[in-house]
Every structure is written in C-alpha cells, then in structure tokens.
Image: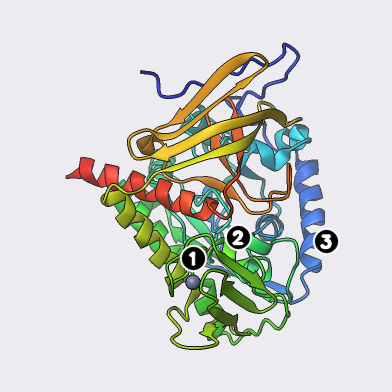
Amino acid sequence: MSEIKDYINYPADVKKYDTSKLPKRQNFFFTSLLYIASNLAVATVKGGSKVEKINMEGLKPPYLLLSNHMQFIDFPIKYKATFPHRVHTIATLEGYYHKPWVMEQIGSICKRKFTTDISLVRSCAKVLREYKDVLCIYPEARYSPIGTQSIIPEVIGKLAKKNKVPVVVIVHHGNYLRAPFWDFRRKKKVPLYATMKQILTADQVAEMSVDEINATIRKEMEYDEYKWQKENNIRITEDYRAEGLHKVLYQCPHCMAESKMNSKGIHLFCEECGKKWELTELGELKALEGETEFPHIPDWFEWERANVRKEIEEGRYSFEDDVRVYTLPGALKYYYMGDAKVRHNIEEGFVLEGSYNGEPYRVQRTPKSLYSLHVEYDYCHIEPIDCFDISTQHDSFFCYPTKQNVITKLSFATEEMYKILTEKKDK
Ligand SMILES: [Zn+2]
C-alpha cells in the first residue's frame, strides 16, 4: 500500500511548487541586503542582543551551521553573525508565503515539514561542495514550544559526515522568553544572548561515527530557557506574561482534566477544578493555594508527554475530530478545502479524509513516517487560531480542529508513537 495518497482535484490553473529544485547560489547583493535588514531587526530588540563567538577564528565556509529555533528573530541574529559569508538555509514553503522569489534569490532550500525528500541531500551537497557556502539548518524544524530542545533527527549527523565539513552551532537564549511560540506577537523586554561555536572540525567529523556526531550535536545544543532566566536573574515584569501558557500546559496536574486550562495576566488556571498558579517574574510557577506541582515549567510539559505515552502504551490513545482544512500546493495561495475528518491512532497514524472539487481525497502519514508534528499556535498565515499541518512531499494540509486546545497533545502523541515503534524495531 502506498503510504501517502494526497491527490487533490485542483483546478488546472493551480500553481504547485517544486521542492526538488536545486538552490541557486545566494546573490551577494542579497547577502548584503540581508545583513542590513538583519541589523535593523536586531536593533529593535529592547533588551539588546549579543553573540559570543567561540572557536570560530579563521573558520571559513563551507560548514554546517545548526541553530536552535525559538522565534523569527533567530534569522536576523544568524545573518548578522555570519556576514559576509553566504548562508543557505533550509526553509519551509509557508515561511516564504507570497514571496518564493525571495527564497530563491537568497538560495534557501525548500522543504515541507517532517517529510522525507531525497532531493534535499543533493541540494545540501550543492551548497557545501559546489558553492562552498554555509548550510544552515534548524534541526528542531519548529519553534520551541517550551524553551527546551526538541527532537534532532539522525539525518543531521549523516549530512555532516557525508559532506566532511566542520559543524558550528548557534544556541540562542532569551528569544523564547521574549516571544514564546504560544504568545509570539507581543515582544517582552528580555536581553538576547547567543553562542556561535565550532563544535567539530572537518577532521573530527571524518574520524567520528554518525552516532558520535549526533550525540555531540545534541549535547552542544542543549538549552533550557527557564533555567537560563533564573541563572541570569532576568525579570520579566510584563503583566500579561502568562497569557497563552495554557496552550502548552493543557493538562491540570491537580484534577488531571485536559484542555480545560486557561490563562490571564500573570496567572494560569484550571477551569475544571479552579486551581490557579502565578507565573513569577523569574519564570517559575507558584500555586496560589496548596502544593506547587511543577515550579519548573518544562517539568510540567514533560509530565504531560509521559501521560500521553502511557495512554498509547496502554492502548487508550485515539483522537478523532472534524477539522477545517487549507492546503498550500504552491507558495502563493492557501486553498480552502472545507470540512474533513481526521483521526490519529497508533495503527494508522494520521488519516485525513475529505473531498474537494467533487472528488474525495485521503491523506495518511503512518506513525513511523512522522517523528514530529508541525503545530501552530495562533497561526499567522490563515486563521489566527491553533492548527496543525500534515504535509506530504507535494502538499501541506493545515487542519483547524473543532476540539479546543488539543494540538500540543497531538504533537506529543506523534513523537511518542514514533519513539515506541522505532524503539521496538531496534530491539
Ligand atoms: Zn484542574
């Protein structure tokens, strides 16, 4: 059975984007333009921004540049820090919505999220071996939901090994605290600090196994924004600092209810049992009454993940909902597909069924083909509310659930199913 059936009966004039196109070399005019625009963007950061370079002296491209990912400001900081070198970045189509020509001029490599695209290997080799430029990847492939490291896939180490290039990592701090994914529109006053460090030379890459390279990358890219906030005594005094936090902390640790959490001002609360927590200026949670279950926010997040994993292991997990669907076959327009049905379980993974233009369609991503899920809180391009996207190599299906506050749990379920199934395979 073919894994992905994504045929949509589009009208003939719908322009699709070919993600297998090889990247152009970045036009140096654009390298300079990016530098100027990036300087202007970084200058707007109220708390200031600093990049410390470690072990970078004398290092010239080609090299692989990996960065953690928290907010849009990550891009300007990177372009500023790498100038005058040309940097080709792996990007997603929706990142260049309405402006695919910019993506091509700056030599970005286009990919759909969490899909396997064989042309990517050729595109990366072209940047590193032929253009001899910097290849930048955000290996977590999405903004950090909770200010800690997300999954870094195996393929990153393979890419370094295959192309025999040094590995540099940028680890940003403060970007998440300034504008967390769950409340990204309002920028808080937080200083930004990043390290840019050569973690492996080309010789080290040549000597190490792929597993060793990946282990080094994962270790060097560890971060915990709330820990960093406390260690650096950064006070976030904005009186709306907790607003949106319920999108990632969706389960109440007091009464266990799911999707009943809410937030307002500096408080997070459960609408089911009424328990309330304050988010302090130093980024800790404090219950207003009774026990504080998780003062450290990422611990709450990981507790939810463990609950989802247990549900899957005990055969209790399944999700079904009616969703509104929009697709993005090209970079110029989202197509409204109307309503559809989605289900998610360990036997089938995601199955999306609907019909468009008089013909039914069915999209499936099995659990083993999807190690993580693209979710968007308050999505900026279509409807400004939460959605998730199931992508295939040729199209992306943005699904707006009817059920409230469910997308974080869906992303946990996707990641844990993948882990459970691949761990079994390893045994
Ligand atoms: Zn509760």
Residue 131 in view of the camera: no
In the image, what residue type sits under mark 3?
Leu
Q: Tell me the CA gap for discs 2 and 1.
A: 9 Å
Q: Of discs 2 and 3, which sits in the foreground?
A: 2
Q: Which residue is mark 2?
A: 70
Label 2 element class: loop
Q: Which mark is residue 306?
A: none
Q: Residues within 10 Å of mark 2 (few under 14, many from 20)?
A: many
Q: Secondary structure at mark 3?
A: helix
Q: Is mark 3 within 8 Å of ligand 1?
A: no
Toward which corner of the image does residue 97 lie, by quadrant?
A: top right
Q: How is the image coloured?
A: rainbow
Q: Nearer the viewer, residue 81 or 366?
A: 366
What residue sits 59% from the left and 74% below the top? 268
Q: Earlier in the sequence, mark 2 or mark 3?
A: 3
Q: N-terminal of the two: label 2 or label 1?
A: 2
Give the Cα distance between marks 3 and 1. 28 Å
Image coordinates for residue 412, horizontal then vertical, percent: 43, 53
x 48%, y 20%: residue: 5
Location of the N terminus (image quadrant): top left
Residue extending farthest to the top is: 12
- Label 1: how many residues lie within 10 Å, few (<14), some (14-19) or many (20+)? some
Amino acid at dot 2: Met
Q: What residue do we see at 49% from left, 39% from top?
A: 114
Mark 3 vs 1, N-terminal side: 3
Q: Position of residue 326 (x, y in %)?
A: 67, 33
| Disc 1 secondary structure class | loop
**Amino acid of disc 1:** Thr
Q: Which residue has dot 1 on it?
A: 148
Residue 40: which disc? 3
